[in-house]
Amino acid sequence: QGEKYASDTRKEASKPEVSEPEVSICSGEGSFSPPSDIIIDYEKIRKMDKSPLKRVKPYTIKAYEKYMLDDAGNEHYTFLNYISATYGDCRHFTDIGTRYVASSLAAGSNFKTPIWTFDLPTSVERKEAFRGRGEKGWKKVVQAEGVQIKFHNVDLMKVSDEKIKFYLGTWFVMLDTFHEPDTVPFEREFFQRMIDIGFKGVLALDDIHLNSEMKKWWKELQKGAEKGGYKTYDITEIGHSTGTGLVDFSGKVTIKK
């Protein structure tokens, strides 16, 4: 149940950048370095307590509530809860592809780590998750639960290098957008931009086995790992059934099956 940009970035050239002002009180903001070694412990992920996800599931669309509580290996939300609960600190996580806010809610379910979520300037899909409250009303109840989510409607391929470094100035980024890296090459271009700015954190990719284009791109990432200075891990067993991959630029990720 992938989060995704609502439309092709190439069609948004005339749209202004719109995002919320940032106020950071976290001294670690801007650092790509993970807080410690990151162990992807399959057994612990499978046994994660669902209570945090139960608390946040009412704030996505009704149809997604069951997905948020589905087992690791079927859906990726338990994995996101594990990452935030085990390793999240005061630095924000970056979620590319807001859609119905489900991934952001799961990533913020440690009730400590702020989530900055991004979609295109024209995207309105998240409004369905508000369930009639409006954005201000939705934010009020979500913040009362302890989850901090900032919405950004911006074409990330058109912002300055300084701005993209700011948005990605953390150690964990989730990318879940078009899933057509040849036809609509946002994922491919955004990944290259991460390399160009020197990102040294951990990137999670959803739906790496969804279709032929995603399968091809994932193989390309695997082949380019040594040259690109990163390692790749297929964690579909505890992620999303359509494929979840990690790209580790930090050298701190270990897989424990």
Image: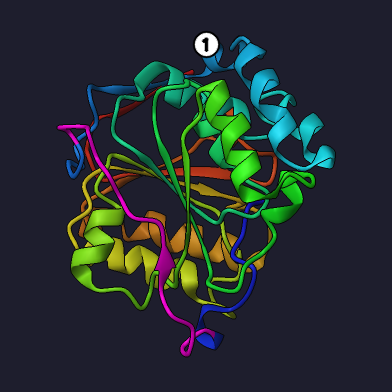
Which residue is the extreme one toward the bottom? 14
Q: Where is residue 218 in the image (x, y as percent from the top left)?
A: 49, 57
Q: Residue at x 55, y 12 (%)?
A: 43
Which residue is nearer to you in this view: 54 or 183? 54
Measuring from the top left, give residue 4's x and y in whole percent. 61, 59
Splitting the image into 4 quarters, where does residue 36 fall? top left
Kindly tell me whether residue 237 is visible in this rendering. no
Residue shown at the point (36%, 63%) measured from the top left: 191
Q: On the image, numbered disc 1 is attached to which residue?
A: 44
Q: Relative to residue 127, is residue 156 depicted above or below? A: below
> Is the residue 236 above or below the residue 48 in the image?
below
Residue 227 pos. (x, y %): 21, 60
Q: Kindly report the secondary structure that dominates the magenta region of the rendered protein.
A: loop
Residue 159 is drawn in which quadrant? bottom left
* Observer-nearest of 192 and 162: 162
Q: How dense is the environment of label 1, judged by Cα within 10 Å: few (below 14), some, or many (20 and up)?
A: few
Question: Looking at numbered disc 1 in the image, what kind of residue is underneath it?
Answer: Lys
Q: What stretch is highlighted in magenta?
A: 12-28
* Percent of width and height locating residue 158: 35, 78
Can residue 202 be seen?
yes
